[in-house]
Protein backbone atom coordinates (compact mmCIF):
# COMPACT_ATOMS: atom_id res chain seq x y z
CA UNK A 1 0.00 0.00 0.00
CA UNK A 2 2.94 2.37 0.59
CA UNK A 3 3.51 2.95 -3.07
CA UNK A 4 -0.08 4.15 -3.46
CA UNK A 5 -0.57 5.95 -0.19
CA UNK A 6 2.90 7.48 0.36
CA UNK A 7 2.27 10.99 -0.99
CA UNK A 8 -1.25 11.27 0.42
CA UNK A 9 0.22 10.39 3.83
CA UNK A 10 3.03 12.92 3.36
CA UNK A 11 0.41 15.55 2.50
CA UNK A 12 -1.62 14.66 5.59
CA UNK A 13 1.46 14.93 7.80
CA UNK A 14 3.08 18.06 6.32
CA UNK A 15 0.14 20.31 5.56
CA UNK A 16 -2.63 20.38 8.18
CA UNK A 17 -0.71 22.11 10.99
CA UNK A 18 -1.44 25.55 9.59
CA UNK A 19 -5.08 24.70 8.96
CA UNK A 20 -5.48 23.55 12.56
CA UNK A 21 -3.98 26.80 13.82
CA UNK A 22 -6.16 28.92 11.54
CA UNK A 23 -9.10 26.75 12.59
CA UNK A 24 -8.66 27.92 16.20
CA UNK A 25 -9.02 31.51 14.95
CA UNK A 26 -12.00 30.66 12.80
CA UNK A 27 -13.88 28.77 15.53
CA UNK A 28 -13.12 31.50 18.02
CA UNK A 29 -14.35 34.19 15.66
CA UNK A 30 -17.47 32.12 14.99
CA UNK A 31 -17.04 32.25 11.23
CA UNK A 32 -17.22 28.56 10.47
CA UNK A 33 -18.11 28.79 6.79
CA UNK A 34 -15.47 31.37 5.88
CA UNK A 35 -13.33 28.72 4.16
CA UNK A 36 -16.07 27.64 1.80
CA UNK A 37 -16.95 31.26 1.03
CA UNK A 38 -13.31 32.09 0.31
CA UNK A 39 -12.83 29.02 -1.89
CA UNK A 40 -15.98 29.99 -3.76
CA UNK A 41 -14.70 33.54 -4.32
CA UNK A 42 -11.50 32.10 -5.81
CA UNK A 43 -13.45 29.80 -8.10
CA UNK A 44 -15.58 32.73 -9.20
CA UNK A 45 -12.31 34.39 -10.24
CA UNK A 46 -11.38 31.31 -12.23
CA UNK A 47 -14.77 31.37 -13.94
CA UNK A 48 -14.09 34.96 -15.00
CA UNK A 49 -10.75 33.83 -16.42
CA UNK A 50 -12.56 31.09 -18.34
CA UNK A 51 -15.04 33.62 -19.67
CA UNK A 52 -12.27 35.67 -21.23
CA UNK A 53 -10.61 32.51 -22.61
CA UNK A 54 -7.54 32.49 -20.43
CA UNK A 55 -5.60 29.30 -19.99
CA UNK A 56 -6.56 27.64 -16.71
CA UNK A 57 -2.98 27.08 -15.62
CA UNK A 58 -1.72 30.56 -16.54
CA UNK A 59 -0.42 33.24 -14.18
CA UNK A 60 -3.18 35.60 -15.30
CA UNK A 61 -5.80 33.10 -14.14
CA UNK A 62 -4.04 32.78 -10.81
CA UNK A 63 -3.89 36.57 -10.50
CA UNK A 64 -7.62 36.92 -11.14
CA UNK A 65 -8.43 34.20 -8.62
CA UNK A 66 -6.17 35.94 -6.11
CA UNK A 67 -7.90 39.25 -6.86
CA UNK A 68 -11.30 37.74 -6.07
CA UNK A 69 -9.93 36.23 -2.87
CA UNK A 70 -8.69 39.68 -1.82
CA UNK A 71 -12.07 41.12 -2.72
CA UNK A 72 -13.65 38.55 -0.40
CA UNK A 73 -11.15 39.48 2.31
CA UNK A 74 -12.06 43.16 1.87
CA UNK A 75 -15.79 42.44 2.10
CA UNK A 76 -15.44 40.36 5.25
CA UNK A 77 -13.11 42.83 6.96
CA UNK A 78 -15.42 45.77 6.23
CA UNK A 79 -18.57 43.95 7.38
CA UNK A 80 -16.97 42.62 10.57
CA UNK A 81 -18.05 45.60 12.67
CA UNK A 82 -17.45 45.88 16.36
CA UNK A 83 -21.10 45.91 17.19
CA UNK A 84 -23.67 44.89 14.70
CA UNK A 85 -27.14 43.43 14.55
CA UNK A 86 -26.04 41.21 11.69
CA UNK A 87 -23.74 38.33 12.55
CA UNK A 88 -20.65 37.95 10.39
CA UNK A 89 -21.75 34.40 9.54
CA UNK A 90 -24.76 35.85 7.67
CA UNK A 91 -22.50 37.96 5.48
CA UNK A 92 -20.30 34.94 4.84
CA UNK A 93 -23.30 32.85 3.88
CA UNK A 94 -24.54 35.52 1.50
CA UNK A 95 -21.11 35.89 -0.07
CA UNK A 96 -20.99 32.14 -0.58
CA UNK A 97 -24.35 31.74 -2.28
CA UNK A 98 -23.94 34.82 -4.45
CA UNK A 99 -20.44 33.76 -5.53
CA UNK A 100 -21.66 30.22 -6.24
CA UNK A 101 -24.67 31.43 -8.21
CA UNK A 102 -22.58 33.99 -10.11
CA UNK A 103 -20.21 31.17 -11.08
CA UNK A 104 -23.17 29.20 -12.50
CA UNK A 105 -24.27 32.24 -14.52
CA UNK A 106 -20.77 32.93 -15.82
CA UNK A 107 -20.25 29.32 -16.83
CA UNK A 108 -23.51 29.20 -18.75
CA UNK A 109 -22.24 32.17 -20.78
CA UNK A 110 -18.63 31.04 -20.87
CA UNK A 111 -19.81 28.19 -23.06
CA UNK A 112 -17.14 26.00 -21.67
CA UNK A 113 -18.37 23.02 -19.71
CA UNK A 114 -17.72 22.96 -16.03
CA UNK A 115 -15.96 19.62 -15.93
CA UNK A 116 -12.50 21.06 -16.34
CA UNK A 117 -13.11 23.81 -13.83
CA UNK A 118 -14.49 21.40 -11.28
CA UNK A 119 -11.47 19.20 -11.71
CA UNK A 120 -9.17 22.14 -11.31
CA UNK A 121 -10.83 23.52 -8.20
CA UNK A 122 -11.46 20.38 -6.28
CA UNK A 123 -8.50 18.10 -5.85
CA UNK A 124 -8.34 14.54 -4.62
CA UNK A 125 -5.91 13.81 -1.79
CA UNK A 126 -5.34 10.30 -3.16
CA UNK A 127 -3.82 11.72 -6.34
CA UNK A 128 -1.56 14.48 -4.99
CA UNK A 129 1.76 14.80 -6.76
CA UNK A 130 5.04 15.50 -4.92
CA UNK A 131 5.28 18.88 -6.64
CA UNK A 132 1.84 19.90 -5.38
CA UNK A 133 2.69 18.86 -1.84
CA UNK A 134 5.96 20.81 -1.80
CA UNK A 135 4.42 23.92 -3.40
CA UNK A 136 1.61 23.93 -0.87
CA UNK A 137 4.04 23.26 1.96
CA UNK A 138 6.20 26.20 0.87
CA UNK A 139 3.21 28.53 0.88
CA UNK A 140 2.10 27.25 4.28
CA UNK A 141 5.57 27.83 5.75
CA UNK A 142 5.56 31.40 4.41
CA UNK A 143 2.08 32.12 5.80
CA UNK A 144 3.03 30.37 9.03
CA UNK A 145 6.05 32.67 9.43
CA UNK A 146 3.88 35.77 8.93
CA UNK A 147 1.43 34.45 11.49
CA UNK A 148 4.22 33.62 13.92
CA UNK A 149 5.89 37.01 13.65
CA UNK A 150 2.62 38.90 14.01
CA UNK A 151 1.02 36.39 16.39
CA UNK A 152 0.33 38.87 19.18
CA UNK A 153 -1.86 41.13 17.09
CA UNK A 154 -3.55 38.28 15.20
CA UNK A 155 -4.42 36.46 18.42
CA UNK A 156 -5.65 39.62 20.09
CA UNK A 157 -7.89 40.49 17.15
CA UNK A 158 -9.35 36.99 16.99
CA UNK A 159 -9.62 36.14 20.66
CA UNK A 160 -10.20 39.45 22.42
CA UNK A 161 -11.58 41.96 19.98
CA UNK A 162 -12.61 44.47 22.64
CA UNK A 163 -9.08 44.66 24.01
CA UNK A 164 -7.77 44.97 20.48
CA UNK A 165 -10.00 48.00 19.91
CA UNK A 166 -9.03 49.48 23.30
CA UNK A 167 -5.37 49.12 22.49
CA UNK A 168 -5.97 51.11 19.32
CA UNK A 169 -5.20 48.30 16.88
CA UNK A 170 -6.49 48.90 13.38
CA UNK A 171 -8.71 45.88 13.62
CA UNK A 172 -10.10 46.18 10.10
CA UNK A 173 -6.66 46.05 8.53
CA UNK A 174 -5.66 43.11 10.69
CA UNK A 175 -8.88 41.39 9.67
CA UNK A 176 -8.10 42.05 6.03
CA UNK A 177 -4.62 40.60 6.35
CA UNK A 178 -5.99 37.58 8.21
CA UNK A 179 -8.67 36.90 5.60
CA UNK A 180 -6.28 37.44 2.69
CA UNK A 181 -3.72 34.95 4.05
CA UNK A 182 -6.52 32.61 4.98
CA UNK A 183 -7.91 32.77 1.44
CA UNK A 184 -4.52 31.85 0.00
CA UNK A 185 -4.14 28.87 2.32
CA UNK A 186 -7.66 27.57 1.79
CA UNK A 187 -7.72 27.84 -2.00
CA UNK A 188 -4.36 26.15 -2.38
CA UNK A 189 -5.36 23.31 -0.07
CA UNK A 190 -8.75 22.89 -1.78
CA UNK A 191 -6.93 22.38 -5.05
CA UNK A 192 -5.06 19.38 -3.75
CA UNK A 193 -7.53 17.97 -1.24
CA UNK A 194 -11.08 19.14 -1.95
CA UNK A 195 -13.62 21.23 -0.07
CA UNK A 196 -14.73 18.59 2.44
CA UNK A 197 -11.22 18.03 3.73
CA UNK A 198 -10.40 21.72 4.13
CA UNK A 199 -13.49 22.25 6.19
CA UNK A 200 -12.79 19.23 8.40
CA UNK A 201 -9.15 20.11 8.96
CA UNK A 202 -10.09 23.62 9.99
CA UNK A 203 -12.94 22.84 12.31
CA UNK A 204 -12.72 19.35 13.83
CA UNK A 205 -9.24 19.49 15.41
CA UNK A 206 -9.95 23.00 16.75
CA UNK A 207 -13.23 21.91 18.30
CA UNK A 208 -11.59 18.82 19.85
CA UNK A 209 -8.77 20.95 21.26
CA UNK A 210 -11.13 23.51 22.75
CA UNK A 211 -13.25 20.71 24.17
CA UNK A 212 -10.36 19.01 25.94
CA UNK A 213 -8.25 21.80 27.40
CA UNK A 214 -7.88 25.41 28.39
CA UNK A 215 -4.95 27.23 26.84
CA UNK A 216 -4.25 28.02 23.22
CA UNK A 217 -1.00 26.09 23.29
CA UNK A 218 -2.78 22.95 24.45
CA UNK A 219 -5.59 23.47 21.96
CA UNK A 220 -2.98 23.56 19.26
CA UNK A 221 -1.14 20.42 20.38
CA UNK A 222 -4.35 18.42 20.78
CA UNK A 223 -5.60 19.76 17.45
CA UNK A 224 -2.40 18.72 15.71
CA UNK A 225 -2.59 15.25 17.21
CA UNK A 226 -6.22 14.85 16.14
CA UNK A 227 -5.41 16.11 12.63
CA UNK A 228 -2.49 13.68 12.33
CA UNK A 229 -4.43 10.68 13.66
CA UNK A 230 -7.57 11.48 11.68
CA UNK A 231 -5.73 12.07 8.42
CA UNK A 232 -3.44 9.06 8.52
CA UNK A 233 -6.08 6.69 9.94
CA UNK A 234 -8.57 7.90 7.36
CA UNK A 235 -6.10 7.13 4.58
CA UNK A 236 -5.58 3.64 6.01
CA UNK A 237 -9.32 2.99 6.10
CA UNK A 238 -9.58 4.33 2.58
CA UNK A 239 -6.98 1.83 1.45
CA UNK A 240 -8.27 -1.18 3.36
CA UNK A 241 -11.88 -0.81 2.36
CA UNK A 242 -11.21 0.91 -0.95
CA UNK A 243 -13.14 4.08 -0.18
CA UNK A 244 -12.82 7.57 -1.68
CA UNK A 245 -9.96 8.99 0.41
CA UNK A 246 -11.23 12.48 1.23
CA UNK A 247 -14.59 11.24 2.46
CA UNK A 248 -12.92 8.49 4.51
CA UNK A 249 -10.76 11.06 6.31
CA UNK A 250 -13.75 13.30 7.01
CA UNK A 251 -15.74 10.43 8.52
CA UNK A 252 -12.74 9.40 10.61
CA UNK A 253 -12.68 12.96 11.95
CA UNK A 254 -16.37 12.68 12.77
CA UNK A 255 -15.73 9.48 14.71
CA UNK A 256 -12.78 11.05 16.54
CA UNK A 257 -14.91 14.00 17.55
CA UNK A 258 -17.55 11.68 19.01
CA UNK A 259 -14.84 9.80 20.93
CA UNK A 260 -13.48 13.07 22.31
CA UNK A 261 -16.98 14.18 23.31
CA UNK A 262 -17.60 10.90 25.14
CA UNK A 263 -14.16 11.20 26.74
CA UNK A 264 -14.86 14.66 28.13
CA UNK A 265 -18.24 13.48 29.39
CA UNK A 266 -16.64 10.73 31.46
CA UNK A 267 -13.84 12.98 32.62
CA UNK A 268 -16.20 15.66 33.81
CA UNK A 269 -18.57 13.42 35.76
CA UNK A 270 -16.11 12.65 38.59
CA UNK A 271 -15.25 16.36 38.76
CA UNK A 272 -18.81 17.38 39.36
CA UNK A 273 -19.28 14.57 41.90
CA UNK A 274 -16.32 15.63 43.95
CA UNK B 1 14.91 13.76 -2.06
CA UNK B 2 16.89 10.94 -0.52
CA UNK B 3 13.65 9.66 0.82
CA UNK B 4 11.91 9.67 -2.51
CA UNK B 5 14.77 7.66 -4.03
CA UNK B 6 14.38 5.04 -1.38
CA UNK B 7 10.70 5.16 -2.06
CA UNK B 8 11.29 4.58 -5.77
CA UNK B 9 13.39 1.53 -4.98
CA UNK B 10 10.61 0.13 -2.82
CA UNK B 11 8.08 0.85 -5.51
CA UNK B 12 10.09 -0.87 -8.21
CA UNK B 13 10.72 -3.88 -5.97
CA UNK B 14 7.03 -4.05 -5.30
CA UNK B 15 6.28 -3.74 -8.99
CA UNK B 16 8.72 -6.56 -9.78
CA UNK B 17 7.18 -8.83 -7.18
CA UNK B 18 3.64 -8.16 -8.34
CA UNK B 19 4.66 -8.53 -11.96
CA UNK B 20 6.23 -11.92 -11.32
CA UNK B 21 3.16 -12.94 -9.34
CA UNK B 22 0.97 -12.00 -12.26
CA UNK B 23 2.91 -14.06 -14.75
CA UNK B 24 3.06 -16.97 -12.34
CA UNK B 25 -0.69 -16.96 -12.16
CA UNK B 26 -0.74 -16.90 -15.96
CA UNK B 27 -3.63 -14.49 -16.43
CA UNK B 28 -3.28 -11.08 -18.04
CA UNK B 29 -4.22 -8.20 -15.77
CA UNK B 30 -6.40 -6.00 -17.91
CA UNK B 31 -7.83 -2.67 -16.80
CA UNK B 32 -10.48 -0.85 -18.83
CA UNK B 33 -11.44 2.72 -18.02
CA UNK B 34 -15.07 2.15 -18.94
CA UNK B 35 -17.42 -0.86 -18.80
CA UNK B 36 -18.00 -0.99 -22.57
CA UNK B 37 -14.31 -1.63 -23.23
CA UNK B 38 -14.29 -4.12 -20.35
CA UNK B 39 -17.22 -6.03 -21.81
CA UNK B 40 -15.58 -6.32 -25.24
CA UNK B 41 -12.22 -7.22 -23.67
CA UNK B 42 -13.91 -9.99 -21.69
CA UNK B 43 -15.30 -11.47 -24.92
CA UNK B 44 -11.83 -11.49 -26.45
CA UNK B 45 -9.83 -12.53 -23.40
CA UNK B 46 -12.19 -15.08 -21.89
CA UNK B 47 -10.61 -16.92 -18.98
CA UNK B 48 -7.10 -15.87 -19.98
CA UNK B 49 -7.54 -12.41 -18.49
CA UNK B 50 -8.58 -10.73 -15.26
CA UNK B 51 -10.59 -7.70 -16.23
CA UNK B 52 -11.33 -4.63 -14.12
CA UNK B 53 -13.46 -1.69 -15.25
CA UNK B 54 -12.67 1.50 -13.32
CA UNK B 55 -15.93 3.40 -13.92
CA UNK B 56 -19.24 1.85 -12.96
CA UNK B 57 -21.83 1.42 -15.69
CA UNK B 58 -24.12 3.97 -14.07
CA UNK B 59 -21.37 6.52 -13.46
CA UNK B 60 -20.91 9.59 -15.65
CA UNK B 61 -17.77 8.78 -17.66
CA UNK B 62 -16.72 12.45 -17.53
CA UNK B 63 -16.44 12.36 -13.74
CA UNK B 64 -15.21 9.27 -11.94
CA UNK B 65 -14.21 9.26 -8.29
CA UNK B 66 -10.76 7.76 -7.81
CA UNK B 67 -10.30 5.08 -5.17
CA UNK B 68 -7.03 3.56 -3.92
CA UNK B 69 -7.71 0.27 -5.71
CA UNK B 70 -7.68 2.13 -9.04
CA UNK B 71 -4.04 3.04 -8.54
CA UNK B 72 -3.20 -0.48 -7.40
CA UNK B 73 -4.94 -2.06 -10.40
CA UNK B 74 -3.25 0.33 -12.83
CA UNK B 75 0.08 -0.40 -11.26
CA UNK B 76 -0.39 -4.16 -11.75
CA UNK B 77 -1.94 -3.88 -15.20
CA UNK B 78 -0.43 -5.67 -18.19
CA UNK B 79 -2.91 -3.97 -20.50
CA UNK B 80 -4.87 -0.74 -20.16
CA UNK B 81 -7.77 0.01 -22.48
CA UNK B 82 -8.95 3.61 -22.64
CA UNK B 83 -10.95 5.60 -25.16
CA UNK B 84 -8.08 7.76 -26.29
CA UNK B 85 -10.51 10.55 -27.18
CA UNK B 86 -10.34 12.65 -24.01
CA UNK B 87 -13.57 11.31 -22.51
CA UNK B 88 -11.62 10.28 -19.40
CA UNK B 89 -9.36 13.34 -19.44
CA UNK B 90 -10.70 14.63 -16.13
CA UNK B 91 -9.66 11.63 -14.08
CA UNK B 92 -7.37 9.19 -15.92
CA UNK B 93 -4.18 11.29 -16.27
CA UNK B 94 -3.67 11.89 -12.52
CA UNK B 95 -4.32 8.19 -11.86
CA UNK B 96 -1.73 7.17 -14.44
CA UNK B 97 0.72 9.69 -13.05
CA UNK B 98 0.36 8.00 -9.69
CA UNK B 99 0.46 4.48 -11.03
CA UNK B 100 3.73 5.00 -12.97
CA UNK B 101 3.40 1.75 -14.87
CA UNK B 102 5.69 1.78 -17.93
CA UNK B 103 3.86 -1.19 -19.46
CA UNK B 104 0.71 0.84 -20.10
CA UNK B 105 2.23 4.07 -21.34
CA UNK B 106 0.88 5.44 -24.62
CA UNK B 107 2.68 3.74 -27.49
CA UNK B 108 3.52 0.58 -25.55
CA UNK B 109 1.91 -2.73 -26.60
CA UNK B 110 0.09 -2.81 -23.26
CA UNK B 111 -1.87 0.35 -24.00
CA UNK B 112 -4.98 0.16 -26.16
CA UNK B 113 -6.45 3.50 -27.14
CA UNK B 114 -9.77 2.32 -28.49
CA UNK B 115 -10.38 5.29 -30.79
CA UNK B 116 -7.15 4.73 -32.70
CA UNK B 117 -7.81 4.47 -36.42
CA UNK B 118 -11.48 5.36 -35.94
CA UNK B 119 -12.75 8.47 -37.65
CA UNK B 120 -14.47 10.37 -34.87
CA UNK B 121 -17.56 12.41 -35.63
CA UNK B 122 -18.19 16.06 -34.73
CA UNK B 123 -14.54 17.08 -34.68
CA UNK B 124 -14.70 20.82 -33.97
CA UNK B 125 -13.38 22.94 -36.82
CA UNK B 126 -12.07 25.52 -34.40
CA UNK B 127 -10.18 24.44 -31.32
CA UNK B 128 -10.67 27.49 -29.09
CA UNK B 129 -13.28 25.43 -27.25
CA UNK B 130 -15.80 28.24 -27.24
CA UNK B 131 -18.60 25.90 -28.26
CA UNK B 132 -19.07 24.15 -24.93
CA UNK B 133 -17.43 21.33 -23.08
CA UNK B 134 -16.51 19.83 -26.41
CA UNK B 135 -13.90 17.20 -26.95
CA UNK B 136 -11.22 18.55 -29.26
CA UNK B 137 -10.61 15.15 -30.84
CA UNK B 138 -14.30 14.62 -31.70
CA UNK B 139 -17.28 13.00 -30.01
CA UNK B 140 -15.85 10.24 -27.78
CA UNK B 141 -19.03 8.20 -27.26
CA UNK B 142 -18.27 5.87 -30.15
CA UNK B 143 -18.64 2.28 -28.89
CA UNK B 144 -22.44 2.31 -29.24
CA UNK B 145 -21.90 1.89 -32.98
CA UNK B 146 -21.53 -1.91 -33.36
CA UNK B 147 -19.27 -1.54 -36.40
CA UNK B 148 -16.91 0.63 -34.39
CA UNK B 149 -17.15 -1.91 -31.58
CA UNK B 150 -15.73 -4.49 -34.00
CA UNK B 151 -12.77 -2.22 -34.66
CA UNK B 152 -12.27 -1.78 -30.92
CA UNK B 153 -12.37 -5.56 -30.49
CA UNK B 154 -9.69 -5.89 -33.17
CA UNK B 155 -7.45 -3.38 -31.32
CA UNK B 156 -7.89 -5.28 -28.10
CA UNK B 157 -7.23 -8.68 -29.66
CA UNK B 158 -4.05 -7.36 -31.27
CA UNK B 159 -2.81 -5.95 -27.96
CA UNK B 160 -3.56 -9.18 -26.08
CA UNK B 161 -1.76 -11.20 -28.75
CA UNK B 162 1.29 -8.95 -28.53
CA UNK B 163 1.52 -8.98 -24.76
CA UNK B 164 0.63 -12.67 -24.38
CA UNK B 165 1.85 -14.25 -27.63
CA UNK B 166 1.30 -17.85 -26.51
CA UNK B 167 -2.47 -17.39 -26.63
CA UNK B 168 -2.61 -15.51 -29.93
CA UNK B 169 -4.84 -18.09 -31.62
CA UNK B 170 -7.28 -18.02 -28.72
CA UNK B 171 -7.64 -14.22 -28.84
CA UNK B 172 -7.96 -14.19 -32.62
CA UNK B 173 -10.59 -16.91 -32.48
CA UNK B 174 -12.63 -14.97 -29.93
CA UNK B 175 -12.34 -11.79 -31.96
CA UNK B 176 -13.66 -13.65 -35.00
CA UNK B 177 -16.56 -14.96 -32.90
CA UNK B 178 -17.35 -11.45 -31.67
CA UNK B 179 -17.24 -10.12 -35.19
CA UNK B 180 -19.55 -12.86 -36.47
CA UNK B 181 -22.04 -12.23 -33.65
CA UNK B 182 -22.08 -8.50 -34.40
CA UNK B 183 -22.47 -9.11 -38.14
CA UNK B 184 -25.42 -11.40 -37.58
CA UNK B 185 -26.94 -9.05 -35.04
CA UNK B 186 -26.50 -6.03 -37.30
CA UNK B 187 -29.06 -7.56 -39.69
CA UNK B 188 -31.55 -7.98 -36.89
CA UNK B 189 -30.95 -4.53 -35.37
CA UNK B 190 -31.04 -2.87 -38.78
CA UNK B 191 -34.34 -4.55 -39.60
CA UNK B 192 -35.87 -3.37 -36.33
CA UNK B 193 -34.78 0.21 -36.83
CA UNK B 194 -35.55 0.36 -40.57
CA UNK B 195 -39.15 1.64 -40.18
CA UNK B 196 -37.83 4.71 -38.38
CA UNK B 197 -35.19 5.71 -40.89
CA UNK B 198 -34.75 9.49 -41.02
CA UNK B 199 -36.80 10.09 -37.85
CA UNK B 200 -35.62 12.62 -35.31
CA UNK B 201 -35.14 11.99 -31.62
CA UNK B 202 -34.00 14.16 -28.72
CA UNK B 203 -31.33 13.38 -26.15
CA UNK B 204 -30.16 14.95 -22.92
CA UNK B 205 -26.48 14.87 -23.89
CA UNK B 206 -24.88 14.52 -27.31
CA UNK B 207 -23.64 10.95 -26.83
CA UNK B 208 -25.69 9.10 -29.46
CA UNK B 209 -24.40 10.48 -32.74
CA UNK B 210 -22.68 7.17 -33.66
CA UNK B 211 -25.74 5.09 -32.78
CA UNK B 212 -27.95 7.43 -34.81
CA UNK B 213 -25.57 7.37 -37.75
CA UNK B 214 -25.50 3.56 -37.78
CA UNK B 215 -29.25 3.13 -37.71
CA UNK B 216 -30.22 6.03 -39.94
CA UNK B 217 -31.75 8.21 -37.25
CA UNK B 218 -31.24 11.89 -36.48
CA UNK B 219 -30.59 12.34 -32.77
CA UNK B 220 -29.90 16.04 -33.03
CA UNK B 221 -32.00 17.88 -30.43
CA UNK B 222 -30.35 18.20 -27.03
CA UNK B 223 -31.73 19.28 -23.68
CA UNK B 224 -28.30 20.62 -22.78
CA UNK B 225 -27.72 23.94 -24.55
CA UNK B 226 -24.06 22.98 -24.87
CA UNK B 227 -22.41 19.73 -23.82
CA UNK B 228 -21.93 19.76 -20.05
CA UNK B 229 -23.99 22.93 -19.48
CA UNK B 230 -27.25 22.44 -17.53
CA UNK B 231 -30.46 23.21 -19.47
CA UNK B 232 -31.68 26.81 -19.19
CA UNK B 233 -35.38 27.79 -19.37
CA UNK B 234 -35.09 29.60 -22.70
CA UNK B 235 -33.24 26.70 -24.27
CA UNK B 236 -35.84 24.21 -23.03
CA UNK B 237 -38.60 26.40 -24.46
CA UNK B 238 -36.87 26.33 -27.83
CA UNK B 239 -36.39 22.57 -27.56
CA UNK B 240 -40.06 22.02 -26.76
CA UNK B 241 -41.10 24.08 -29.76
CA UNK B 242 -38.71 22.26 -32.06
CA UNK B 243 -39.86 18.89 -30.76
CA UNK B 244 -43.50 19.77 -31.39
CA UNK B 245 -42.73 21.06 -34.89
CA UNK B 246 -40.77 17.94 -35.79
CA UNK B 247 -43.16 15.60 -33.92
CA UNK B 248 -40.27 14.08 -31.97
CA UNK B 249 -41.42 11.07 -29.97
CA UNK B 250 -38.45 10.11 -27.83
CA UNK B 251 -36.08 11.80 -25.37
CA UNK B 252 -33.04 9.73 -24.55
CA UNK B 253 -31.61 10.03 -21.03
CA UNK B 254 -28.74 8.24 -19.33
CA UNK B 255 -28.60 7.16 -15.68
CA UNK B 256 -26.52 10.15 -14.52
CA UNK B 257 -28.67 12.77 -16.27
CA UNK B 258 -31.42 14.77 -14.63
CA UNK B 259 -34.43 12.66 -15.59
CA UNK B 260 -36.88 15.21 -14.15
CA UNK B 261 -35.99 17.75 -16.81
CA UNK B 262 -36.57 15.16 -19.52
CA UNK B 263 -39.91 14.20 -17.93
CA UNK B 264 -40.96 17.84 -17.90
CA UNK B 265 -40.14 18.27 -21.57
CA UNK B 266 -41.88 14.97 -22.30
CA UNK B 267 -45.01 16.14 -20.50
CA UNK B 268 -45.26 19.28 -22.61
CA UNK B 269 -44.50 17.59 -25.93
CA UNK B 270 -46.15 14.18 -25.64
CA UNK B 271 -42.80 12.50 -26.25
CA UNK B 272 -41.61 9.53 -24.21
CA UNK B 273 -38.56 9.44 -21.98
CA UNK B 274 -36.38 6.53 -23.03
CA UNK B 275 -33.81 5.29 -20.54
CA UNK B 276 -30.62 4.60 -22.42
CA UNK B 277 -27.12 3.72 -21.31
CA UNK B 278 -23.77 3.59 -23.02
CA UNK B 279 -22.43 0.91 -20.74
CA UNK B 280 -23.27 -2.78 -20.39
CA UNK B 281 -24.82 -3.42 -16.99
CA UNK B 282 -26.46 -0.03 -16.55
CA UNK B 283 -29.84 -1.28 -17.74
CA UNK B 284 -31.45 -4.51 -16.50
CA UNK B 285 -30.31 -7.61 -18.38
CA UNK B 286 -27.53 -5.95 -20.32
CA UNK B 287 -24.44 -7.60 -18.93
CA UNK B 288 -22.77 -7.91 -22.34
CA UNK B 289 -22.24 -5.47 -25.17
CA UNK B 290 -24.58 -7.32 -27.53
CA UNK B 291 -27.38 -7.47 -24.94
CA UNK B 292 -26.95 -3.74 -24.35
CA UNK B 293 -27.42 -2.87 -28.03
CA UNK B 294 -30.37 -5.32 -28.09
CA UNK B 295 -31.97 -3.36 -25.25
CA UNK B 296 -31.25 0.03 -26.84
CA UNK B 297 -32.76 -0.98 -30.18
CA UNK B 298 -35.78 -2.52 -28.44
CA UNK B 299 -36.39 0.54 -26.26
CA UNK B 300 -35.99 3.15 -28.97
CA UNK B 301 -38.08 1.21 -31.48
CA UNK B 302 -40.79 0.87 -28.83
CA UNK B 303 -40.84 4.62 -28.18
CA UNK B 304 -40.77 5.63 -31.84
CA UNK B 305 -43.58 3.21 -32.73
CA UNK B 306 -46.10 4.71 -30.32
Image (cartoon, coloured by chain):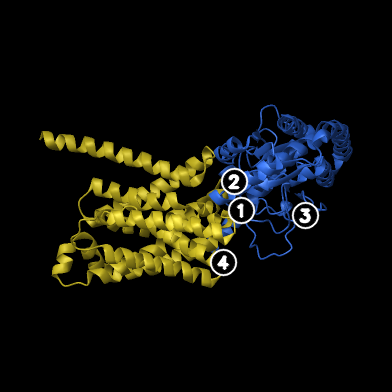
Chain colours: A yellow, B blue
Chain label for disc 3: B
- For residue A47, side relative to residue B220 (left or right): left
Residue identified by numbered label 2: B64
Q: In the displayed structure, would residue A158 be above or below residue B254?
A: below
| Between discs 3 and 2, the one toward the N terminus | 2
**Sequence-first tag of 1 and 2:** 2
Which residue shows up at 66% across the image and 28% down it? B284
| Front-lying residue, B229 or B272 | B272
Instruction: Please give the chain letter of the residue carrying mark 4.
Output: A
- In which quadrant is the C terminus of chain B drawn? top right
Disc 4 target residue: A57
Residue A228, image x and y in percent?
Answer: 39, 50
Q: CA distance from mark 1 to mark 2?
A: 8 Å
Question: Mark on residue A142?
Answer: none
Disc ID at residue B90: 1
Image position, residue A266 (x, y; %): 22, 35
Residue that carries the numbered disc 3 in the rendered image: B108
- State if disc 2 and disc 4 touch (CB < 8 Å): no
Disc 4/disc 1 C-alpha distance (Å) = 15 Å
Q: Residues within 10 Å of mark 2 (few under 14, many from 20)?
A: some
Quadrant housing the N terminus of chain B: bottom right
Does the residue at mark 3 contact the one at mark 2 (Cβ under 8 Å)? no
Residue at x-position 33% and y-position 42%: A257
Whether label 4 touches label 1, CB < 8 Å: no
Mark 1–mark 2 contact, CB under 8 Å? yes
SS for callout 3: loop
The span from disc 4 to disc 2 (Cα, nearest Å) is 22 Å
Decide: few, some or many residues near mark 3? Use Cα within 10 Å; few <14, some 14-19, many ≥20: few
* Residue B184 spot, x, y in % from top left: 88, 32
Q: Is residue A212 left or right of residue A189?
A: left
Amino acid sequence: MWDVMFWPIVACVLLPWLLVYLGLHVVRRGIIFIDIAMAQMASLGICVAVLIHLDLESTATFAIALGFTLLGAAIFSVTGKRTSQIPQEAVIGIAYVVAAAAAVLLLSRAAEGDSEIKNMLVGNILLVTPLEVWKCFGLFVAVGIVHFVLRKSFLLVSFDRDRAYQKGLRVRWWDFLFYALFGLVVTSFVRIAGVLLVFSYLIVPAVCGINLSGTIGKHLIIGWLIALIGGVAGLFFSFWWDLPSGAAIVCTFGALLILVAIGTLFRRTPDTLS
Amino acid sequence: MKHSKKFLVIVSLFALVTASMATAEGKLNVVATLPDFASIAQQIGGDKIDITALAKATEDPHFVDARPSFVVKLRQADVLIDGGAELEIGWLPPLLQNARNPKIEVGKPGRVQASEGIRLMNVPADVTRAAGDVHVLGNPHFTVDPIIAKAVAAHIARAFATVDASNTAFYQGNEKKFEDTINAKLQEWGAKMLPFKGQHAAAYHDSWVYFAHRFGLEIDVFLEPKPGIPPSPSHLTAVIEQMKAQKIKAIIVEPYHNRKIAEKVAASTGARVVDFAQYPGALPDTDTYVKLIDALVERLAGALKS
